Image (tube, grey):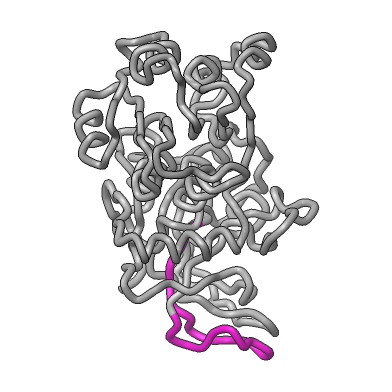
């Protein structure tokens, strides 16, 4: 089989395909013929040294995949050859409190990921993919969509009439717009592009603020867009450089869900702004197996379709990473692995 690995752990240009033996499923494992893989920002952050955890060198990248069961090992009862499945982001976190060390055992930083033609995993590390969802669509759900779902359905689930703020047009943010609208929430979004603003409105964002033109976008959203109320929930993917604005936009006793770290600047946290916001800050790490199963059911029932900017062929994997790094995409970047 063909599999991609990073020959140089510090360069995206070092992604190389190589021939490797097809693994055999052991007891309790399934062999998945990979059909599609989607990329997340963490896939480049790991290589460029921007991730919150260190990565082992030489690993197969990518956490998100869809495929079909090609073979099963002894003792497998949940799946049979031909079943359609998608990966779960945390291969050992099935529900409740995550096991110790779970963050260091995720795909691409602790163990081999999914950018290969075949992969063996525990039968608990995949969930069923409904027939109405394509391989490419299914591959977008394990990380970005599940993260958005966890952000919106956590300790204080979003209800109809609530206001949700999303930042930018990356995978998590686009899924958050779609899911929040499906839940009946009012969505406000930010972007720096007029073209992307129109796209966000077409997806259902009621108001879009250009953060390149409005530096104090947090205060603007609270005072002008929401009439002084503030937003109920912020899906905070920007990180240290945007948190101060999010604190200005959130309503008292609202929630800021800490997800990403797309910005490199780190001006620090203003304690008095944090205390004065009366908001809850909740840091999440995608979600467990149960969250992915809930998301898949909700996604199928809603009839929504993921936003896929472009699908690359398996031989074009490096070009897919380059597009992600350039940040010119809207939604998800997908690699089709097999027919």
Residue 141 in sight from this viewpoint: yes
Location of the C terminus by quadrant is bottom left
Q: Is residue 128 above or below residue 54?
A: below
Q: Is residue 318 visible?
A: no
Is 2 situated above or below 311? Answer: below
Check if residue 68 falls in the magenta segment: yes
User: In x, y percent, where is residue 321?
Assistant: 39, 44
Q: Which image quarter: residue 239?
A: top right
Give the percent coordinates (x, y) of residue 315.
33, 58
Q: Nearer the viewer, residue 19 or 214?
A: 214
* 337 left or right, relative to 114: left
Q: Residue at x 80, y 52 (%)?
A: 100
Which residue corresponds to the image point at 33% horizontal and 14% vertical from the top-left?
212
Lateral position of residue 36 relative to residue 28, left or right: left
Residue 327 appears at what percent x and percent y? Answer: 35, 33
Residue furthest toward the right? 100
Q: Which residues are magenta?
A: 64-83
């Amino acid at each position: 089989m063909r599999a991609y690995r990073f020959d140089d752990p510090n360069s995206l240009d070092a992604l190389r395909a190589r021939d490797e033996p097809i693994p055999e499923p052991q007891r309790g494992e399934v062999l998945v013929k990979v059909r599609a893989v989607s990329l997340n920002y963490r896939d480049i952050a790991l290589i460029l040294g921007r991730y919150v955890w260190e990565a082992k060198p030489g690993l197969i990248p990518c956490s998100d995949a869809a495929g079909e069961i090609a073979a099963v090992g002894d003792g497998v009862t949940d799946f049979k050859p031909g079943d359609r499945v998608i990966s779960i982001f945390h291969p050992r976190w099935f529900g409740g409190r995550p096991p110790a060390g779970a963050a260091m055992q995720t795909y691409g930083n602790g163990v081999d990921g999914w950018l290969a033609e075949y992969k063996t995993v525990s039968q608990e590390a995949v969930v069923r993919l409904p027939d109405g969802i394509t391989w490419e669509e299914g591959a977008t759900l394990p990380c970005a969509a599940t993260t958005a779902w966890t952000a919106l359905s956590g300790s204080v689930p979003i209800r109809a009439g609530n206001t949700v703020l999303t930042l930018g047009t990356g995978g998590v943010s686009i899924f958050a717009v779609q899911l929040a609208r499906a839940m009946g929430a009012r969505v406000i979004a930010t972007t720096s592009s007029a073209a992307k603003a129109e796209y966000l409105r077409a997806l259902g964002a009621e108001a879009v603020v250009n953060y390149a033109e409005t530096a104090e976008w947090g205060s603007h959203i609270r005072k002008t867009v929401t009439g002084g109320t503030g937003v109920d929930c912020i899906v905070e993917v920007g990180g240290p450089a945007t948190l101060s604005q999010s604190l200005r936009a959130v309503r008292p006793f609202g929630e800021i869900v800490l997800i990403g770290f797309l910005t490199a600047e780190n001006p620090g946290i203003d304690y008095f702004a944090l205390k004065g916001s009366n908001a809850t800050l909740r840091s999440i790490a995608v979600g467990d197996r149960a969250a992915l199963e809930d998301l898949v059911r909700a996604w199928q029932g809603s009839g929504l379709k993921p936003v896929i900017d472009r699908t690359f062929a398996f031989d074009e994997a490096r070009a897919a990473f380059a597009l992600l790094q350039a940040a010119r995409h809207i939604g998800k970047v997908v690699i089709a692995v097999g027919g």
